[in-house]
Image: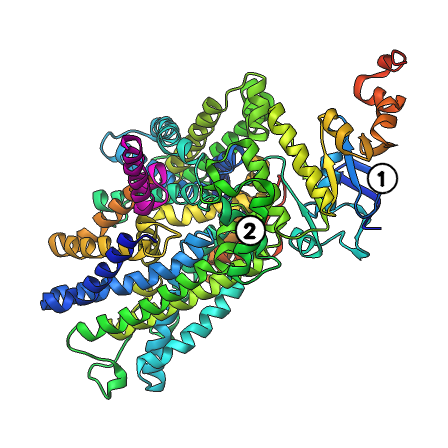
Amino acid sequence: MLLEAKGIIKAFGSFHAVDGADFGLEEHELVGLIGPNGAGKSTFFNCIAGDTVPTAGTIRFRGIDVTRLAPDRHARLGLARTFQVPIVFEGMTVGENVMVGAFLRHPQARRAVEKAAEMLEFTGLAAQARMPGTALGTAGRKRLGIARALATEPNLLLLDEALAGLTSGEMEAAIELLTRIHARGITLIVVEHIMEVIHRLAERVLVFHQGRVIAQGTPAEVTADEAVIEAYLGRRARGRRG
Amino acid sequence: MILLQLAADGLLLGAVYALFSSGLTLIWGMMNVINFAHGDFVMLAMYVAFFAATLLKLGPAIFVPLAAVLMFGFGVMVYLALVRHVMRGPMLAQIISTFGLALFLRYSALWAFSANFVSLPDRLAGGVYDLGGIRLAASHLLAGATALLLTLGLHLLLTRTDLGSRMLAVSEDRVAAALVGIRADPMQAFAWGLGGAATGVAGGLIALFFYVSPEVGNSFTLLAFVTVCLGGFGSIPGALLAGLAIGVIQSFSAYWFGPSSKDVVVFALFVALLWVRPQGLLGRA
Amino acid sequence: MTRPARAALLVGAVLLVIAPVLAGNAFYQRIAALVVLAAISASAWNVIGGYAGQVSFGHAVYFGIGAYASLLAFTKLGLPPIAGAPLGILASFVLSVIMGLPTFRLRGHYFSMATIAIAELVELLVTNWRFAGGAIGLMGPATPRSVADLLFRSALPYYGLFLVVLAILLALTWWMERSRMGFYLRALGSGERAAESLGVPIRRYKLYALLISGAFTSVAGSLYAVMIGFVDPSSGFGILVSVNMVVMAALGGAGTLFGPLVGAIILVPLAEMTNAFLGGGGAGAAYVAYGVIIMLMARYSPGGLAQWAREIRALVSGRRRRAA
């Protein structure tokens, strides 16, 4: 198993943002993480990414206990992530931004440049390589975040609402990119609100609600699940579905 | 007996520290900005008090509120003219902006008033009281009591009033606040004004018994920072407790190690805090 | 770099080197030496303050360490002052570790405030330390006992020496800029969370930057002690020493290679001439101006003159493109 999270609890005072979540991930999967706002999926995501240390529970990545490790160690082990609000390194070009990621596996500048160029090509940003990173729009910045993360040569890529705020054309391109990333052999966890994306991409979906996983299955199974419908739409909506 | 005396003196002074540190913690809590010029605001207020007392022959009942009003306006002005813009910029700009302000204030004061220490006329606020063996100067009592009341008042303003709720909303989540119709700009400007007013009152009070000189800004800024650090960034009750604690610590250390140890004690406390507990006693990290 | 830019740089470099020689005037030679010395400190500050974005307002502590190490080596051990420089560097390493470890895991403001506090604390301690001359300070050799004492009557040899050190520092910085360290520092300076997620060990790299920055600032302090032959707590550790470094680097462009040098070229002569005109009171006026400069820069052009130059160039080339 590539990633294994057991009994994750994250408490803020008496409030349990994540209240006992278990999760297992095999290589080459493409898993979606959905749930209403405040369900705890972002907190769970951050626990896996290493940004937050869970109050209880363990996370093992490639057999190694990463529960308390800092994010830079996660990256080194092959776990990369993107940010919901993309963080662009100011004062650097698009290409230089990607190089920061590339330097992880390629300490020599020349090799890092090559790796960065390869990732720019792969994500379709090659034409903007010399532009300042801040000159990119939302879609470009999200793409940059992905290119940068890919440059670290991860086994597992965590995408935090990578498709939010995109036009339908941009979304098509993004879905196509994610498909290509998956085809390259990289395992993906995708946190999303946009159900269309989940239906098209995810093989397996986890639904979070009030800090727990309340349903797991294919997108079709999960969207028909009564507990899920109740979580999103409330109890009265439950009976209305066929 | 001497211990009680020292403690009393320390608490009274500490209350004043707490007041201007509350101003700093308020600004920090609102917008994550450290005002490196905070101590120089206090210095300005002290000069206002000095000139009001010596040139205009006004008493503290007038010049303390006067300083408060002037520094309120000054705080708002600094926000509008400088801080508001650098908040949107890179971190370097945010950090050096108020430092530049501190430089400007300090050296303008040095140039205008020279490095000489001056002090307000004696006995502006009554004489000395004897409370069961403890001697308390009226000026100290006035300062301590006023500072304590105002610090509590500030806390109540934030937690009990509508205005306070709006300010807290902006400090927690600017976007969400905007969505419910609370504009961040006026709230932040007001926070700077309040922070300024706090320094105004504190400066006016301190001037009653401290020497006034352009250089005091430096130690006051550091003191305010340590107080806020100890009490927790954004927490006024924390600043109060921490301010009182530091006042008492300084009082005892001055007695045991001499007056020059007062600064060293603050430094040592700060360094210790950095190593041990930077988030402080109360308040969020 | 484009061809014309490279040519301009070369011409500028040559002029810089030969200017004082051409000037021949002792006053200008002295200013030139001071400019280069200031550029060393400012460029050293730039590594931690500009590239890594950790703004230190207390870098004088390193400068003072270097100056005092040199003059202590002379007064207590009879060594030529420059021999104290390695000791200063060693001490600066120790201080960097002590200061960096607790503050680097916190937000930038903590580091900045800590630097102010520590510099003041050290100044206070040294003022009360009779071994180091207390408030009076230390003096260097009055007459040269050997060449190693580096006591020259003209400022020109100092100018040459300082230029060599500056060249080494800038070459090191230039190499760093292009290497992994440079990228990592700039990344953590502008987006720490994102940098960490890409595998950048944040605290380690901040410490590297501080170690280098502190060491070179210490060297600058030693060189200062060698040339001026005197140091006391305020000229070694005073806040004004720190402020000078920050303003020069920021004015020219923090995080750029030549920014600090440009800042030094502009401000040092100005400060010296203000001093000459206004006498003692002039020093205060310079810092009022510095405060205004910093505020204006923070408000309008945080990248200093370098940013300004970039924007003008973009404006011009944009216009040219539109016309074409």
Q: Range of the magenta residues?
A: C296-324
Name the residue at the front extreme: C324
Query: How far, Cα to Cα, is label 2 from label 1?
Result: 39 Å
> In this view of the protein, can residue B123 be seen by the observer?
no
Q: Depth check: B250 or C179 in front?
A: C179
Marking on residue A116: 2
Q: Do labels 2 and 1 share a chain?
A: yes
Number of disc labels: 2
Dot 1: what SS? Answer: strand
Q: Position of residue B234 (x, y in %)?
A: 56, 37
Subunit bearing disc 2? A
**What quarter of the picture does the C terminus of chain A occupy?**
top right
Q: In this view, does B274 lie to the left or right of B110?
A: right
Amino acid type of the residue that numbered disc 1 sits on in the rendered structure: Gly
Q: Label 1, on which residue? A: A20
Q: Position of residue B208 (x, y in %)?
A: 36, 39
Amino acid type of the residue that numbered disc 2 sits on in the rendered structure: Ala
Marking on residue B58: none
Tell me the quarter of the picture where residue C77 sits: bottom left
Residue B50 among those drawn in magenta: no
For mark 2, does the 10 Å Cα neighbourhood hold few (<14), some (14 to 19), or many (20 or more) residues? many
Q: Is residue A105 left or right of residue C117?
A: right
Q: Is residue A109 above or below residue A221?
A: below
